[in-house]
Amino acid sequence: MKQRQEMAADRSRSWFRISGTQYFAIILVIGGVFFIYSIWEMTPDWNPKMWMQNQSSDLWIFLERQRQKKISLHSVVNVSSSTHPQTDNVTSAPEVKRETAVVAPYVSPGPYLVEYPYEYSFIINEPQKCEQEKPFVVLMVPVAPNNRRDRDIIRSTWGNDRVVQDKVVTLFFLLGLHTGPGAEQVQQQVLQESNKHHDLIQSNFVDCYKNLTIKTMVMLEWLTAHCSGASYAMKIDSDMFLNVHNLVTMLLNAQKTNYMTGLVVRSGTVLRDPHSKWYVPPDIYAPAVYPVYALGLGYIMSLDLPKKLTEGSRHVKALYIEDVYLGLLMQHLGISPTDPPNGDYFHVLPLAYNRCHFSRIVATTTHPSTDHVHIWKDFKKPGPYC
């Protein structure tokens, strides 16, 4: 520190020999040094590498936002657990809402929990669409911001079934923030896609596997705020095949409230192997089995549940395994998921395409090499299925 002060003193004695441009550059460098030093002093345990591993890019976002303001780009925003963001809304296109937030240091809740409840905001929104279309069922597809390919495939296949048995079906894709190299370009592409299709909902959390629980809870918040007039919502992964006709048929005969169904898991074992992708230690969740829950590949709920589940989240720690966490919330509410009326409706293992068999299911996972467009064209062609 003494050496740093002596160097500063030497520099101060030589200001009169420095040109105006050099003076300005040195001021910026010194200001940056003191800015970073002040952060270090305020948080002595701060570890830059660990900070980045926890998906906190707050400093980068702060500096990037200052630069982006000069070229009128959309500001990428992260969130923290220490203070709630203050938002300013700027409308740049019909029905597209952009927000920026005051960023504070990120505090990780640990490797097995996520930062929820928290006041996340929507960067891209379609707040009037449900009111305008009055859907019977809303399809919510969580997908990474840079995964335009899957979104386009869904739009041209099962996501294009918009009126089934005189019931309106509305499609939305749910996104978080892309981080790392190319984030700026991805965000610009997402904004352009939103202006074209008006089916994207984006919130200001980092879009990654661990944050799927955050993505799910933000989805429930959005449904409560903007789509509570619908009867049902289905969360469905982007690699699924969905028989929309059978989905609507099933829901026409389903209970109207406290309803959740899908591929229901009973007595699911808690994995204690630290090498497992879904490892949960006993100090996070002590029982050996989970409560009843519906697998995250595709589950349906009545639209009274989103508000109840988000309220329940105030009392149940947010586990990073999103479908299990919904099961914990359902247990807290004293509500059990319902088995579908047909045990063959949902498949977690990919089914080989067969027109007859696919006509009898609601949803199945698919192989990565599946040509979804080809299958859909064959499935929708005239003639009997079997």
Image: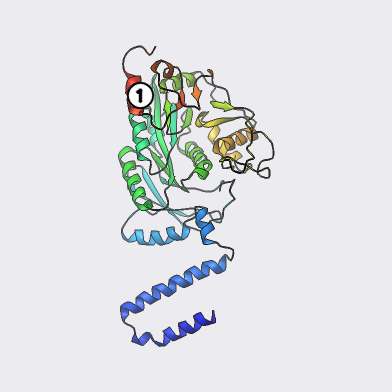
Picture quadrant where residue 94 is located: top left
Residue type marked 1: Ile
**Where's residue 289, x and y in %?**
66, 33
Task: Choose between 307 and 108: the one closer to the eye.
Answer: 108
Relative vertical location of residue 347 with respect to residue 278 in this rendering, above or below = above
Of the 4 image quadrants, the one containing the C terminus is: top left
Picture quadrant where residue 379 is located: top left
Q: How many marks?
A: 1
Of the 4 image quadrants, the one containing the N terminus is: bottom right
Indicate how the structure is coloured in the image: rainbow
> Which residue is rendered at x = 54% and y = 48% of the image?
118
Inspect this view and state whether residue 260 appears.
no
Horizontal side, residue 165 vs residue 118: left or right: left
Horizontal side, residue 155 vs residue 41: left or right: left
Q: Residues within 10 Å of mark 1 (few under 14, many from 20)?
A: some
The kind of secondary structure element at disc 1 is: helix
Q: Which residue is mark 1?
A: 375
> Which residue is rendered at x = 35% and y = 32% of the image?
153
**Where's residue 356, x and y in %?**
41, 15
Task: Choose between 111 and 194: the one closer to the eye.
Answer: 111
**Where's residue 328, x and y in %?**
62, 36
> Which residue is rendered at x = 37% and y = 36% of the image?
151
Relative vertical location of residue 148 with respect to residue 108 in this rendering, above or below = above
> Which residue is rendered at x = 42% and y = 44% of the image?
202
Inspect this view and state whether residue 368 appears.
yes
**Where's residue 32, x and y in %?**
44, 70
Relative vertical location of residue 92 with respect to residue 1 in this rendering, above or below = above
